[in-house]
Image: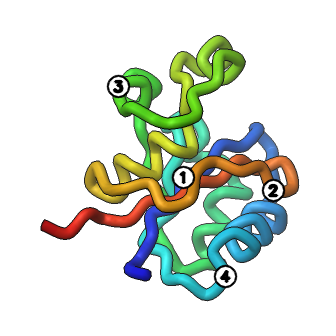
Amino acid sequence: MAELAVGLGLRSGTPADPIVAAVREMLGDNEISCLATIDRRMGEPGLRDAAAELGVAVQGYAAAELAEVPVPNPDARTSAAVGTGSVAEAAAILAAGHGTLVITKRIVAGVTIAAAQRTTG
């Protein structure tokens, strides 16, 4: 499998350990290109530390941008809370250059995670 863009939904204050554990549990040894999430989580120390541990960058997207991405599992509670029905799936798709979702959202240790692969044409 090619490098994967990993989309994450997480609560403020989430430490790095559960983020890294969720990524490793869901993706195993697959290479990842970045962690992606909603822009309001970009400054989270746990997210920054997880990205550093995994050796990848963090990308953030505005809620309005995420809301425009069609996803298989939108969530009304997420929409009410942050203004978009999807953070993890939509962020993964955007970070993969509007790629193909290869892992739909799952919740691992309180972290919502999804992954997308760049579509080759």
The residue most toward the front is 72
Label 3 SS = loop
Tag nearer the camera, 4 or 1: 4
Give the residue at the far left of this rendering: 121
Above or below, comparing residue 40 to residue 17 in the picture: above
Q: Are marks 4 and 3 in contact (CB under 8 Å)?
A: no
Q: Residue at x 65, y 43 (%)?
A: 9
Residue 31 to residue 113: above or below: below
Labelled disc at residue 28: 4
Which SS class for mark 4? loop
Callouts 1 and 2 close, C-beta under 8 Å:
no
How far apart, in angstroms, are the residues tagged by discs 1 and 2?
Answer: 13 Å
Q: Which residue is denoted by mark 2 in the rendering?
A: 108
Q: Residues within 10 Å of mark 1 (few under 14, many from 20)?
A: many
- Earlier in the chain: of badge 4 and badge 3, it is 4
> How far from the left and from the top, in percent, is residue 1?
43, 81
Which amino acid type is shown beneath numbered disc 2? Val
Q: Earlier in the sequence, mark 2 or mark 3?
A: 3
The residue at 54%/80% (across/down) is 55
The residue pinned by badge 1 equals 7
Q: Is residue 2 above or below residue 50?
A: below
- The three-letter code of the residue at mark 4 reads Gly
Please, what secondary structure does the residue beneath circle 1 have? strand
At x 55%, y 32%, the residue is 86
Proximity of marks 2 and 4: CB atoms separated by less than 8 Å: no
Nearest to N terminus: mark 1 or mark 2: 1
Instruction: Kindly identify which residue carries mark 3.
Output: 68
**Position of residue 14 measured from the top left corner of the image (x, y, whole percent):** 80, 49
* Residue 89 location (% of width, % of height): 52, 44
Q: As drawn, which residue projects farthest toward the right?
A: 109
